[in-house]
Amino acid sequence: MSPALPAAGFVRDLRAFAAVPSVSGEPGHAADIRAAARWLAARLRRAGLEYVRLLATPCHPVVVGSWRHARGRPTVLLYGHYDVQPAGPGTVWRSPPFVPTLRGDRLYGRGTSDDKGQLLTHVAAIEDLLRRHGRLPVNVVCLYEGEEEIGSPSLPGVLERYRAEFAADVAVASDTRMRGPGRPALTYSLRGSVALELRIRGPAHDLHAGAYGGAVHNPAQVLCDLIASLHDDDGRVRVPGFYRGVRRPDPAERARMRRSGPDDRTLLRDAGVRRGWGVPGTTLYERTTVWPALTVNGLTAGHQGPGSKSIIPAYATARIGMRLGAGQDPAWTAAAVARHLARRTPPTVRCELRLVHAASPVQLDRRSEAVTAGVAAYRCGFGVPPLLLRSGGTIPAVSLLRDKLGIGTALLGFALPGDRAHGPDESAHLPTLGRGVVTIAAFLTRMGNLLPERGAVRIDASAVSSDPLLSTVRFPTVMRR
Amino acid sequence: MSPALPAAGFVRDLRAFAAVPSVSGEPGHAADIRAAARWLAARLRRAGLEYVRLLATPCHPVVVGSWRHARGRPTVLLYGHYDVQPAGPGTVWRSPPFVPTLRGDRLYGRGTSDDKGQLLTHVAAIEDLLRRHGRLPVNVVCLYEGEEEIGSPSLPGVLERYRAEFAADVAVASDTRMRGPGRPALTYSLRGSVALELRIRGPAHDLHAGAYGGAVHNPAQVLCDLIASLHDDDGRVRVPGFYRGVRRPDPAERARMRRSGPDDRTLLRDAGVRRGWGVPGTTLYERTTVWPALTVNGLTAGHQGPGSKSIIPAYATARIGMRLGAGQDPAWTAAAVARHLARRTPPTVRCELRLVHAASPVQLDRRSEAVTAGVAAYRCGFGVPPLLLRSGGTIPAVSLLRDKLGIGTALLGFALPGDRAHGPDESAHLPTLGRGVVTIAAFLTRMGNLLPERGAVRIDASAVSSDPLLSTVRFPTVMRR
């Protein structure tokens, strides 16, 4: 298939959008978050969407917009998020995280891949369809939230309150990975997620380590003892019940996973490490998608940075993230970890555990209409059928849409393993985003050919390649400036 | 004895001195360090000292000054440090760490106790003696460094290079604790110190914890495993050889330690904790002064602060401090820890260990002239004889003066257990500093009655209370503003 680069306007938009440091996970960015939400709302209006507005939440606003003139056609909910991960230490980035910078066919900057670039494929596809045809093939409602990176705490309330507004036949979320450039992948399984903050408190204030070292239990040391107690030497989590409920793939799926999924070597190369680690007897792909994992995301105690400070710190903190396999319950697992830690905390210190956020795992039926239509759309955008993959990541919205509104989601993501989402030097591969625009337009078009009754939507796959709407969506150049 | 508050000028000086954030352990304070050095040099000149100047070092300058007109009398080296510990999180302080604030009879601020307040007792004593008598009873040379809190890395070179300038019969260092207000204590033993930085490196950059959690070994987790391996459940350090060479107190000293030293309850109250911890079968006073200890001073990895970031961090760092008992060798102990860590580092990560600084332990002969003269001086300043105590802290200068120049040091310190040195809300007890000025003047005066030959200096203790110079040194008021 021919190279499909996004239009100049797309790159200009992504530059402007990614320049706003809409970091939801750090305080002090509230104004940036609002600026990004307003930018996005203006962009939705410019694309031709209607009823565009910001829904207030206890935390960050949800940007919504809709187009509802396709009478008798299905409604598609388009989901994405405009918030981004913290940049992390700035010195590690080759170019500043919030100065989007073009190098080759990639745009570098926090959020270019996760998720601003992928979100903009929706907007570009809608705009293109409206411009060329004056109408959309389906009704659409856009739901772009600003809290995905902090676990979507406000989303359940928003979905309940605006239940009528978000009623849809199917949803599309673009926040997942393909296997590589030109190797699209439709994700059918997401891990659940639990974020905990563990704090160990010792003396009321930092103590002189000369005066008290050896006589007062050190909270930083206790923290390390507790964290060390969470895994055995083989990489298994030692928390009783941690693996309870995991739905194992049947032999047929395991075989498919071996065929379609990344092998250990590929996964290690993508991660930039030489050796794997973790529960023995499983592939790394299984370890990161089927099985739960427990990860220390951060440690904080006492003196940091250069120089030295000879103290017993008053407290020590760890950020702990868990990913849960399909079939597992976040609340139950968080409670199991809490019990384990409480049992092992010595009486010399106080242990505090805070649940920061939690989201359920999702496993889509590979024969559902959302998946089937997604397969057809990818085939149209990339010229090849997508692989069906499990993801190790979490998108809280997907389980919430299922549980609150009964909507199935097609996970049409355009991130690549080399995008470094959440890491320094995050970037988006622009040709892939260009094909993503085509894919989204194809999905909407395919859904437009279907009957609107929910649950009865089916795909006529043979019609995909000859669809007249899609053949016109092409993006020839990358704008450099 | 009557309350002895320092003169108004003393408090004014300490306010000005402690307002300069001369933090040696954090970069970005080089200008502050120089400002504090220059302030101190000006203060020494104003006190009447001569040849006052800043000696350049590879790091922070040493402030020197001398007065050498007491022909035929001994020479006393006065040691202290004008650098301070980092302030730590500002929000924890009741008043800003570098806005010295008077509350009751204490001046609050970083460095008011450790060591600017104690250092100024030297200057005030010299100034007072010179003002009243036009001369000093001994020759003095002042050596005030700016690197004590980072392990005095430049001091060995300075002592070697200016060997002649620093030749002295005895030294006085004021950087140790008493037992309480009105309960002076002369320290005869200091622990050694080793500061290490341990860094575990994993993936080349932070990884998305969803994508790789469970398949890539987490450096933060490995760091915790390694730190947990350093102690057993009883609080003993598990590094082979860690306790090697410790000189245990003989039964007579143990009996004295039980009489003079703080009991467990007092030590825990001073620390502000409810339970002790550490090597069983010893008192907390012994644990913190006779035995070595290993303390995690700080932890740094991945995401910190509020919010969340779902990553496997690329690296994790721990600051580790050790305190060594008399008889132990810092280099040998550091090597033992390095061997222990290297043996336990899994092949999935890289372990880096950096020696930040090291200082030898010191045990003074309780019958030496430095100690005997110190006892007499305290008795004069506080009206009661001092307790002879071990300290758990480290003053690298004391072992360096002994090893490089053959000078014994009288540890005449005026800090109190409640001063919170190294912690937030550090403060100095002004009446104690006032008595400290008298004590230093008494020490210089006593030394002036002695013969100058090194090693033959002896004290006529009976003469102390009737010394005409000392009875005139009184400080009636605290200046409030």
Image (spheres, coloured by chain):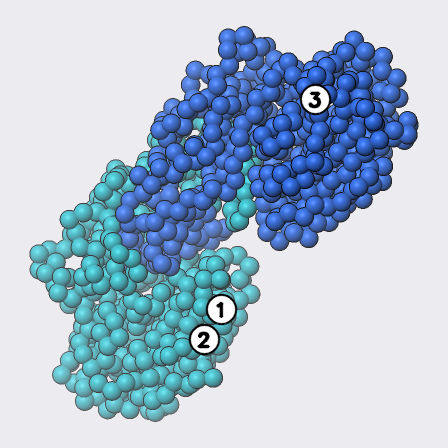
Chain colours: A cyan, B blue
Q: Nearer the viewer, residue A36 or A331?
A: A36
CA neighbours of label 2 inside 10 A, class few (<14), some (14 to 19), many (20+):
some
Q: Nearer the viewer, residue A125 or A317?
A: A317
Give the side of residue A394 with respect to residue A463, left or right.
right
Q: Secondary structure at mark 1?
A: loop
Q: Which mark is residue A96?
A: 1
Who's the residue at 18% across and 67% down the image? A388
In the displayed structure, A397 sits above or below A298; it is below
CA neighbours of label 3 inside 10 A, class few (<14), some (14 to 19), many (20+):
some
Who's the residue at 24% across and 48% down the image? A278
Q: Position of residue A262 (x, y in %)?
A: 20, 63
Give the alpha-carbon distance from disc 3 to disc 2, as whole Å: 71 Å
Q: Nearer the viewer, residue A431 or A32?
A: A431
Same-chain check, marks 1 and 2? yes
Give the chain letter at badge 2.
Answer: A
Q: Which mark is residue A101?
A: 2
Q: Secondary structure at mark 2?
A: strand
Q: Which mark is residue B454?
A: 3
Residue A419 occupies which quadrant of the picture? bottom left
Q: Which mark is residue A206?
A: none
Give the chain letter at badge 3.
Answer: B
Q: Position of residue A106 (x, y in %)?
A: 37, 76
